[in-house]
């Protein structure tokens, strides 16, 4: 019995963070703040006040250079309605294409988006771009600022493909007009890298962040918050391409600079501690990650409060790594205890609450109750469709996971129908090479083989390997899972010796990537024993299952379905070994 394709993770669209919490949100907010800062807000608002003074005696005035761009933008968000009124006054005094009028409209559009209407912001900025290019020129800083704001709000309405194309074109202009290492060019390149990551090309995104980091260090300084942000994101992507150990080391090296620059319990420092704990787990030390999060929890409670959403996220990570350390039953209970707190503090339909429900379902399935996991996801799906839309990445992940647990609960035919219906939607929404699209294709191929067509399954899986390796890197955990499926289907198509040999090569890689007692490593050992027996060595298969069974009993529990499978295989191959040696006669 194959360990199975891992369920789809909740993906990481900006600005939401990774399941099960949202601590990466701060990094996104820091990156997007640069979009606002390049709008010449001081000139625009000062001009509005001057115009108001011309028609309204006693109106306030602003001294030159007295108001920061960030402060003005914050004020604009709160005064969007008032700014609209001032804009109407200016429109009466000036031509509609006057430079300051265009700047005012751009500021108002950004404020409209920040106030909760990103589609209106996008549409207004799209209308402004040709006006700005005609009035100010294509290379004018304000024109570039309007184009970048357009890209930001295009992404915010759920169109990262168009947003990335907009930023990519903008970066080419900014390199020529401002220089490749101008701070605003670097901010746009940072935005481009974040969109590249969002669209699933983690290898390309990692290269972009790696190129940016030395420039940020040289131009902004090694302790600048944006430099620290780029370094943390580079570490995150290093883990995403399969080198969690290097990512862990990058974060560990960055942590002292964060603590010196910001303080030991500054939210950014705590966020870096969070990332470091996660990388420790991703590097194969799930128990170490669990323990580090448990040690972090009091600091989060002191700095942010016991029921702050980031503190609750740390509790979610404790549950997550408890499961990954081999105790899905305890994780299920932790998620179940956390859920009513999130419902009360954040609301029953808050993104983190819904993520908690998704993780509870996953833990329930991993704990052995696959039918309940299926039912929990079936209940979650219509909520996500209504709250965030039917093609939101989280909604599509829920559909994929529902199909996964439907298959695991014993109805692979229905699951295949669900996966086949989902695949074109996933490809249209996020591209054919997005990590979740690839996982879905893997799942579809795997269950095609399990339902009776291993030849077609092997062809589909083999075709996926170079795509996985190109987009995720050869050491990524998903690549390991895919190669395990290839080995399994190789055996199912009549070549058990080759399946055994493939798994022989894969086992040490699983142990390095996950640890020797990670459930995925134990599943690979189970499959290795199976194909060892099928290749004609029942004695070795028996001994391998005999060594594996007590570990699975301890890690998963004696009644877990995977433990029961190992126990049944031990009985089977023990009997085969007796027949082979003549002891059973």
Image (cartoon, helix red, strand yellow):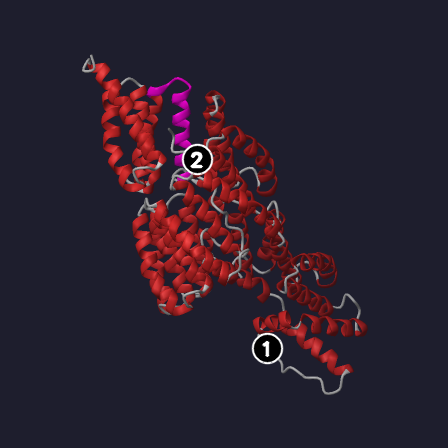
Q: Residue at x 42, y 66 (%)?
A: 267
Circle 1 packing at 10 Å, graded few (<14), some (14-19), many (20+), is some
Single out the residue that lies furthest toward the bottom.
58
Residue at figure coordinates x 39%, y 26% from the top left? 488
What's the magenta region? Answer: 477-497
Q: Quadrant of the C terminus?
A: top left
Residue on which the image places disc 2: 5
Determine whether 145 is above or below 465 in the image.
below
Residue 288 in the image: state x and y as whole percent. 30, 52
Q: Nearer the viewer, residue 172 or 85?
A: 85
Res 262 seen here: no
Asked which quadrant contains residue 37, the reply is bottom right
Classify 95 as above or below 581.
below
Marks 1, 2: nearer the viewer: 2
Q: CA distance from mark 1 to mark 2?
A: 55 Å
Q: Along the line of sight, which residue is nearer the eye, 100 or 289?
A: 289
For mark 2, give the secondary structure.
loop
> What kind of secondary structure does the magenta stretch mostly adopt?
helix
Q: What is the count of numbered marks?
A: 2
Q: Earlier in the sequence, mark 1 or mark 2?
A: 2
Residue bearing the label numbered 1? 67
Q: Quadrant of residue 527?
A: top left
Say whether marks 1 and 2 touch (CB < 8 Å): no
**Quarter of the picture holding the N terminus:** top left
Query: Percent x, y for residue 409?
Result: 46, 34
Residue at 42% x, 19% y: name it: 493
């Amino acid at each position: 019995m194959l360990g199975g394709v891992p369920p789809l993770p909740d993906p990481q669209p900006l600005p939401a963070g990774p399941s099960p919490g949202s601590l990466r949100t701060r990094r996104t907010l820091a990156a997007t703040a640069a979009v606002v800062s390049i709008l010449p807000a001081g000139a625009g608002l000062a001009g509005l006040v001057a115009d108001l003074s011309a028609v309204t005696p006693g109106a306030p005035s602003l001294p030159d250079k007295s108001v920061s761009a960030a402060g003005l933008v914050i004020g604009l968000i709160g005064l969007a309605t008032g700014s609209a009124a001032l804009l109407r006054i200016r429109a009466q005094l000036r031509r509609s294409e006057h430079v300051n009028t265009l700047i005012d409209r751009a500021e108002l559009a950004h404020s409209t988006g920040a106030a909760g209407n990103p589609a209106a912001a996008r549409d207004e900025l799209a209308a402004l771009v040709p006006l700005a290019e005609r009035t100010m020129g294509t290379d004018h800083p304000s024109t570039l600022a309007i184009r970048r704001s357009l890209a930001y709000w295009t992404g915010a309405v759920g169109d990262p493909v168009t947003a990335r194309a907009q930023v990519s074109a903008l970066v080419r202009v900014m390199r020529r007009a401002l220089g490749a290492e101008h701070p605003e060019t670097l901010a746009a390149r940072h935005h481009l890298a974040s969109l590249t990551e969002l669209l699933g090309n983690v290898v390309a995104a990692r290269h972009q962040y790696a190129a940016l980091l030395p420039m940020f260090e040289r131009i902004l300084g090694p302790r600048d918050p944006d430099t620290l942000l780029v370094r943390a994101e580079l570490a995150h992507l290093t883990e995403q391409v399969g080198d969690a150990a290097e990512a862990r080391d990058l974060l560990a090296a960055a942590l002292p600079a964060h603590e010196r620059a910001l303080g030991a319990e500054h939210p950014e420092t705590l966020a870096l501690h969070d990332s470091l704990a996660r990388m420790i787990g991703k590097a194969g030390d799930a128990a170490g990650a669990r323990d580090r999060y448990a040690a972090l929890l009091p600091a989060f409670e002191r700095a942010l409060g016991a029921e702050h959403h980031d503190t609750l996220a740390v509790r979610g990570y404790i549950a997550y790594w408890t499961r990954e350390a081999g105790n899905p039953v305890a994780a299920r209970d932790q998620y179940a205890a956390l859920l009513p707190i999130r419902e009360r503090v954040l609301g029953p339909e808050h993104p983190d609450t819904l993520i908690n429900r998704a993780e509870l379902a996953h833990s329930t399935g991993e704990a052995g109750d696959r039918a309940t996991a299926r039912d929990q996801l079936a209940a979650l799906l219509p909520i996500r469709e209504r709250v965030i839309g039917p093609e939101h990445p989280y909604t599509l992940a829920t559909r994929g996971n529902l199909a996964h647990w439907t298959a695991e609960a014993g109805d692979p035919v229905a699951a295949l129908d669900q996966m086949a219906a989902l695949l074109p939607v996933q490809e249209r929404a996020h591209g054919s090479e997005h990590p979740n699209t690839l996982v879905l294709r893997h799942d579809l191929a795997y269950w095609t083989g399990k339902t009776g067509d291993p030849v077609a399954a092997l062809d589909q899986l083999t075709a996926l390997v170079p795509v996985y390796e190109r987009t995720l890197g050869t050491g990524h955990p998903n690549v390991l899972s895919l190669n395990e499926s290839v080995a399994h289907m190789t055996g199912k198509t009549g070549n058990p010796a080759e399946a055994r040999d493939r798994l022989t090569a894969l086992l040490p890689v699983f142990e390095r990537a996950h640890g020797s007692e990670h459930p995925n490593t134990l599943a690979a050992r189970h499959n290795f024993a199976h194909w060892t027996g099928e290749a004609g060595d029942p004695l070795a298969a028996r001994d391998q299952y005999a060594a594996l069974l007590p570990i699975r009993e301890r890690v998963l529990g004696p009644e877990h379905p995977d433990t029961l499978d190992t126990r049944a295989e031990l009985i089977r191959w023990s009997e085969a070994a007796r027949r082979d040696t003549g002891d059973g006669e």
